[in-house]
Image (cartoon, rainbow, N blue to C red):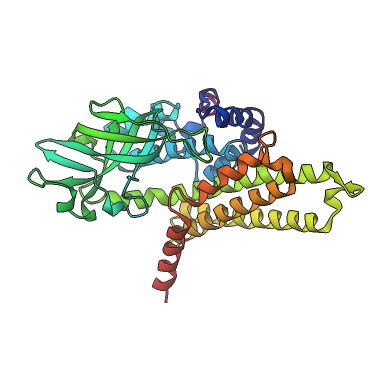
Amino acid sequence: MRDVVREVAEETLRPADREGDRTESFPEDAWDELAALDLTGLAVPESFDGVGADRVTEAVVYEAVAYGSLSIATALSVHGLAASCIDAFASEAQRERWLPEMAGGRPIGAFTLSEPGAGSNPAEMTTVARREGDAYVLEGEKQWITNATRAGVAIVFAKAVPPDAEGPEDVDGETVTQFLVPMDAEGVSVGEPESKLGLRASDTAPITFEGVRLPAERRLTEEGRGLAAAFEILTGGRVAVAAQAVGLGQAAFEDAVAYAGEREQFGGPIADIQSVRHTLAEMRTELATARTLTREAARQLEAGADDAAMTASMAKYAASEAATSVTNDALQLHGGYGYVTEFDVERYYRDAKVTEIYEGTTQIQKEIVARHVLEEV
């Protein structure tokens, strides 16, 4: 599977990423090719026409996709997050309604947790779902949502409030609940896509919910169980981001090796210069370390190990740091050529930074690891 996906990454995804980065638009043809390979059904069980991939296979695939395009890999993993939420928490009727089509690639899924004033601390969210009889009315705004402009269904986290509550300030984070929201529902609107430093082929936009009426069966968790559900799903999401960071770093590393062997200075290829050779050795070691830890996190998650959440955070932290370090070194080894858009390394460099930010910043990962460490004392 890795070899098949990597071939597609080289031949289709990377050229599409170059164009998508230039135009700030998502390459839909590339998405359709992933769907044709059944990769949009990675997180969907076989009983709903999906692949039902284990966690290690998912990590291998996300790494290979990111080797061609981090933007496309991000869109794919977020689609998988949404499918995972439906599979884990929805009723059988909702699973039958959404999962087979999502396995085929459309509707595309979005995962809406972050808000303008609540990024790393989702308990402070202000989006509310007010109970009205056998329905909920959704009000609020989500920000930095991947797939926002393309999505057909969104997993939305909101504070469930009673009819007499004036606002989210009247309830605490323990009321956060998870909902399934069709993007064509009345009252759902998507804002203008963000113009970003990197990941420019991936659409990222705010979503506003104004009086969105949802039947009670669209609630995916019991009231107050939303954050626990989000953290459970995000553990797998962090392994996916770690794998993507490794894939991006691998692409930068291979470009740097090729360039070092071709570029001549001081009477020979720069690969003969000791400082260059040592830099390449360091890059290779960083990537190997990150990949090994990421695969271990995937194995633990698949086995339901007690330490899976901590290992996932360590993998996400280590791999994202490796990606930013390796892409920086790759650009530096290219010299002035690395700074121009003719070479892919400048795009890799811009893309890498986001891996330290989304699905939990590096600082949040350290806090999670520290919490586990201190609980063991």
Quarter of image, res 364: bottom left
- Does residue 205 appear in the picture of this structure? yes
Q: Outermost residue, right direction?
A: 267
Q: Nearer the viewer, residue 206 or 243?
A: 206
In the image, 130: left or right of 41? left
Q: Position of residue 195 (x, y in %)?
A: 47, 35
- Does residue 92 appear in the picture of this structure? no
In the image, 32: left or right of 171? right
Q: Nearer the viewer, residue 44 or 238?
A: 238
Q: Position of residue 72 (x, y in %)?
A: 53, 34
Magenta stretch bounds: 30-38
Q: Nearer the viewer, residue 99 or 263?
A: 263
In the image, 29: left or right of 141? right
Q: Write the residue at 37% across / 31% down.
A: 99
Q: Does residue 17 show up magenta in the picture? A: no
The N terminus sits in image quarter: top right
Q: Position of residue 146 (x, y in %)?
A: 42, 37
Q: Position of residue 79 (x, y in %)?
A: 43, 36
User: Looking at the magenta stretch, what is its main secondary structure?
Assistant: helix
The C terminus sits in image quarter: bottom left
Quarter of image, res 181: top left
Q: Write the residue at 59% across / 27% down.
A: 19
Q: Nearer the viewer, residue 273 or 91?
A: 273
Q: Outermost residue, left direction?
A: 164
Q: Taking 293 as reference, is 213 above or below it?
A: above
Q: Does residue 34 show up magenta in the picture? A: yes
Q: Write the residue at 89% across / 50% down.
A: 266
